[in-house]
Image (spheres, rainbow, N blue to C red):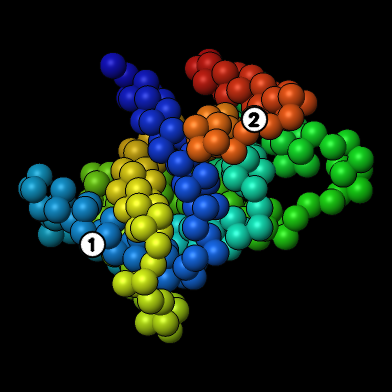
Amino acid sequence: MSPQTQGHLAMLVFSALVAGSFSLGSLMANDIDPMALTAARFAIASVVIGVAVFATGGVSRGAFAAPWRYLALGGLFAAYFVLMFWGLKTAPPVSAAAVFTLTPVMAAGFGWLLLRQITTARMALALAIGAAGAVWVIFRADFAAIMAFEIGRGEVVYFVGCVSHAIYAPMVRKLNRGEPAVVFTFGTLLAGCVILFAAGWSEVMATDWRGLPWLVWVTLFYLAIFASAATFVLLQFSVLRLSSAKVMAYSYLTPTWVIGWEIMLGHGVPPGLVLIGIALTIVALVMLLKPED
């Protein structure tokens, strides 16, 4: 199996795991402060990845050279997750997932700025199609809303977080010095923990952890183990094998996965016209997956 195929398979699993964060996160976004939630999430994920690292040989002597690299990456991803849950306080899960699908366009731009990765004409067309589909879903298939640019505050907040996510992908490739994905992930999570607990200590201490609803704990452990620890490794594994735009192209699958989650949770099926936008994002993904000459 080629490295590129491995990267694609890793991102397919990544998109499936990430989707659960939107539906579960929206159910408990108002039950806990986003800063406290993200700090706990990073702490649990750090323990999980730390066990994996030391069970498979530990950390080499030079793995934590230039620790500023981990602080930069940890800060970017921490900002993404905090802003995601601030956004989910008001943004519907499918709409937030559609905002997430705008990251490939931004990742392509940052990939060129940081790594001089070239976006071919076909890739640019695919990104444009995917962005159009995302916008259609974000505005809930309401052409009048698109013309009036009526968009919720939650979507705007989350969009800022997605900018951090888009920068993160090429930054991993730029800053990695040959460290294995799991070790690099461990360093990023630890740095994120330091930043989050330093910035959100008052929110962490003000949270009534014993009194939290069971759904918050279920979501927290899902986010920490599956949507943080596992996806961190998958993302870092993939960005070393694929271009930033292609890695982020898998975000186009997220709204489709989220719709499946919403149906399973009994939240109904979205309007039929919204599915047009979903179809466009899938077309974009297929176009982006075709190998470049």
Q: Are marks 1 and 2 in contact (CB under 8 Å)?
A: no
Estimate how packed mark 1 is, as few (under 14), some (14 to 19) or many (20 or more) residues with alpha carbons within 10 Å.
Answer: some
Q: What residue is shown at x 18% (from left), y 56% (from top)?
A: 50
Element on which disc 1 rests: loop
Q: Which residue is mark 1?
A: 64
The spot of residue 234 in percent (x, y) is: 34, 39
Within the image, what quadrant is residue 65 found in? bottom left
The spot of residue 200 in percent (x, y) is: 44, 77
Amino acid type at image mark 1: Phe
Who is closer to the viewer here, 5 or 134?
Answer: 134
Amino acid type at image mark 2: Val
Residue 269's disc number: 2
Q: What residue is shown at x 55% (from left), y 31% (from top)?
A: 263
The spot of residue 17 in percent (x, y) is: 41, 38
Q: What residue is shown at x 32% (from left), y 19% (from top)?
A: 2
Q: Is residue 128 left or right of residue 162?
A: right
Q: Is residue 209 left or right of residue 61?
A: right
